Amino acid sequence: MTHPPLMHLLLCTHVMIATLATANTTAADESLQSTATAQGVEVVQQAQDVTVLPTTGTEQIPVVEQEPSSVPLQPVAGPDRAAEPLPPGNCPGMQQGWNTARNFQQRSMPEAAHQTLQRLLNDCPQVSDRLATVYQARDILGRDVALTMAQQQLQRIDTPQPRRQLQTWLYQQHMEQALESFQQGQYSLSSRQLLAQAPQIQQRRDIGMARVLSDSLAREGKHSAALQWRQQAAQWSGNASTDLQAQIWLYINQGDLDNAERLLASANQQQRYLIASQRASQAFAQQQYQQTLQHLDTAQRWRSREQRDHRIMRAWSLYHIQSYDQAYQVFSQLYQQRADDDVGKGLFYSASNSDQLLSALLRHGNKGIIKTLASDPLVRDLRNDVNQQSVPDHQPPLAAMVLQVRQQLAGQQVEAMLSSERANAIEQHARTLARYTLHYRDAAMARALSAAHSQAADARQDRPRQQHIEQSIAWRQRAIDWSDANAEDRLALATAYIQQQRTDDAEHLLQQLVADQPSQGAQRDLLTALYSQRASQAYEQQDYVTALQQLDRLQDYRPLQSTEWSLSGWAHYRLQEYGDAFDAFAQAYDMDEGNPEAASGLMFSAYADNILDDAAELAEQHPGQLRPLLGYEHTFNAARDGVDADYFELQEDGSIVLQPWQRSDWIVSGGTRLSHRSGDSGTSRLTTLRMPEVLLHWRPKYSRHQWWSRISVLQLSSGDADDEAELGLPQCIFASNEDPCPQRDTDSGNQGPLLEPWLQYRYHGKGAALTVALGTTPMGGEVDAKWTGSFSAAIGDESAGLALQLQRRPVQESMLAYVGIEDPHSSDSWGRVLQDSVNISGFGELAEQSRALVSLDWANYQGEQVRDNRSATLYARMGFIPKLRRAQVEVGPELLASYYQHNLSGFSQGHGGYFSPQMLVRMGARLAWQQPLSRRTYWRSQWTLGYQVHHQDCLKAYFANSSRCYQDSSDDSGVAAGIDLAILHRLGRSPHHLGSQFSFNSSPQYNDWSVWLFWQYATDGDSLLQLLDTALQLP
């Protein structure tokens, strides 16, 4: 029989389970609902790319509240209500056995209690008694042991009603066990327990347990399975709103918003809010910012107070649709509430794009990331708070934000600087930008600073102006250094250099530009303009060589224009390069026949170069301005020879007049000349020092007559201790001992000071010249001085001519020959050899740019107690003259042949002490080169190189009609070379000049060299070539 206490216990258990199921379902719904409600968005922001990601955690999934009466529940404890109660059993001692088992359990003897109850189950024959014992076992031993016993009894019971009653009890015990696991938060265990009874739940259509199972699975994150059980519960409940709302929660947590919206009619306000919120998150993640704002507006309808994460999402959406002002307002409010870094980034970017960066730095610069930006040293500089703090290295992404704020503030400063018209404001902006530009090596900023300083220089004067110009050039140079594509910068810098007269720097830059970009015309035009300008300036400064150099460089980049050819012509003309001047003027005139300057220059150079016929031919071809000038040819012809064409002037009416004479009346040259001659056996060593040596040149005005005079003070030194030139009577030479000759026996010795005067007169007519000179041998020596002199006449012009010269001159090859020596034994004097010569020479042009010269010389030699001698010399050369622009060069072969009757190269009585071979032939080459080195420097040189062969008879003792030889004859050959260099330099624009000459000759028999250093005074009107010829004029 069924005991009333047991039935009461079962009914109480049923009520308790149903209440717990309802309570826990409600708690689960609230938990899931709060989780979904709190499920926000995480805004992940990069420097310039914002991504919003939804939170996808495993929070509890809410279960919608339900009314207990709305869910049909099966009995959860005791026998099945549909079955009849079983009749009571007759098992003896059953109650006593229960009590005994309870006592064992209380005494912690569970095995004894279990055995006691197991015996009752084995001994009691009635099913009702065994079921009652199983129910008691649950209270005494616990649910797990009771469930094992119930399973064992279920196998023994065949009767339908008791079996159905026990099955129901087992099901309710499993459900109670699962509910306890759910209440304890053991959702995985609860799910396993309920899934183990899934067939029973479906069979019984247990809505409550289906909901609990759905909730357990949801809390495990198994949303699909949870959704299936919730859908099953909805089917059993007739789509109760509770189940539909629970499905919406599951769809929301799965992110399946489409199905959630399908059930939107059953959704509550909070669910509608969350669906809109999730839609906004999805649209934001897909960068659909306009849709994001629409969904955020929808969410705000269901919850009026917008959450912070939604406001962040709204701010970034506004930013991305370029509503920067609205975005800045929202970010500003959010940052004011809490200075998050992510919000700070949004505030920064929206402020940057809405021109409110300075406002943001001022308003929010006291906290967070904006404070970091506002306190950056370069940012402070650009906000006109110039400081000396070191510039830190920020880490990304802050570094990108700092860079952007620096760039934006720098751009604002540059815009203000370039738009300002006040120099003070420009200077202030330039100081503000200086450190930023240097830090980033910003070429564009350097260009702006260069332009600003240039603009400020225009408003300044004196030193401030120069400082701005220097700063402009310095910043432009930095722009070049910091940029690869810097052609425009280099061009601008070159222009600045030109404005500052730094033409060398400008030229260097422009040459590089033209080389790097040959196809670009701007730099080429500027470079050619620079060369043209420099050529004009050099000409104005009378630096004609530099002017021609600049024009040469200009021609490397473009052809010269007419005015530039004229400038070239006048520069050549001033340098007395009349042929080149004529060619240049011809080019200018050919380009522009109406250029009177080219026409007059053409005539002047034609006259100076004696090519008026060429000018006349050119005038026939190009009448223009040139033909009238030919009518004044008589003016040129009437001018006195030697008058430089610089002193003609073209008048406005086309006439040419001779300007007042301005050539020098007097030319004074003075200096020191040192000469030395040395040789082998039979030739004395001789050193001659002329100090001072003074030369005067006088030319009366408008006269063909010229006078030269020279006075020299000489000091002679001959021989040395090893001198082999034996001196004295022949008896001493052939004596067996030195007793008859106790005094000097060589040419060694010194004489001086000696005085050597010289005077020359020259008449230079048209096609003829006459020269007469008078002088003496050095006076004051051991032998009395003798008169010397010369007479020469020449006819012809530059193309051909003949000359005749009669001359008496001293032989200067030894002291004996030059001044004579007193014999140390007999006190007789001999030596002082004079050469009387007749020279006939002729020259002429063989062909274009070539000419020849032939000279024939016959001479008689006589001296004091020196045997007379005679010689004949032939000299011939041919010269080829290449056409060069400034230099005059002649190169060609030469031949020298000479003959002396006697060998008088000894130093004994009767000999003259001069080189007198009986045969000498030398063949070689000659190079003559002269040209102006600059406007004030001129040089000329002559180089010879050949091979020489000569023969000398034996040296004879000329006494008592004896012809006995005391030195054998000799033959010798070898290389012969010579060099003669001369240079003259005018000291500024003064009439003073400095010059020098160096000559050296070497042959197999002797060597000699000479150095002439001099100062010269001459007023304007003389060419350097004429002055150099005057200084080197020898008697």
Image (spheres, rainbow, N blue to C red):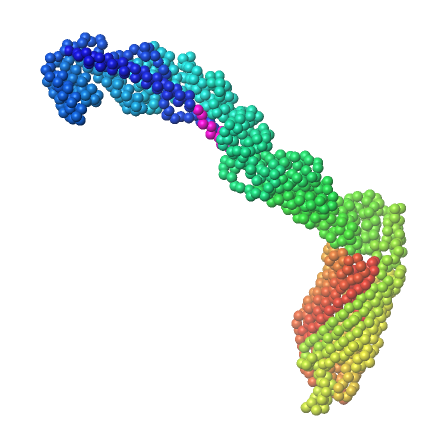
> To which quarter of the image does residue 916 belong?
bottom right
Say if 984 sits above or below 409 in the image: below
In the image, is 704 to the left or to the right of 196?
right
Whether residue 696 appears in this view of the structure is yes
What percent of the width, then of the height, locates residue 355?
60, 30
| Residue in the image at 55% along x and 38% along y | 376
Say if 1006 sits above or below 124 in the image: below
Quadrant placement of the N terminus? top left
Q: Nearer the viewer, residue 552 or 966?
A: 552
- Per the rendered image, the range of residues in magenta is 40-50
| Residue in the image at 15% along x and 24% along y | 104
Whether residue 484 appears in this view of the structure is no
What percent of the width, then of the height, locates residue 214?
32, 19
In the image, is 825 to the left or to the right of 284?
right
Q: Which of 199 and 781 is in front in this view?
A: 199
> To which quarter of the image does residue 577 belong?
bottom right
Say if 812 sits above or below 544 in the image: below
In the image, is 992 to the left or to the right of 472?
right
What percent of the width, then of the height, locates residue 587?
77, 47
Quadrant placement of the C terminus? bottom right
Say if 75 sits above or below 307 in the image: above
| Residue in the image at 66% along x and 41% along y | 450
> To which quarter of the image does residue 855 belong?
bottom right
| Residue in the image at 18% along x and 9% along y | 85
In the image, is 716 to the left or to the right of 600?
left
Q: Is 43 in the magenta?
A: yes
Q: Which of 783 and 68 is in front in this view?
A: 68
Q: Is 486 in the magenta?
A: no
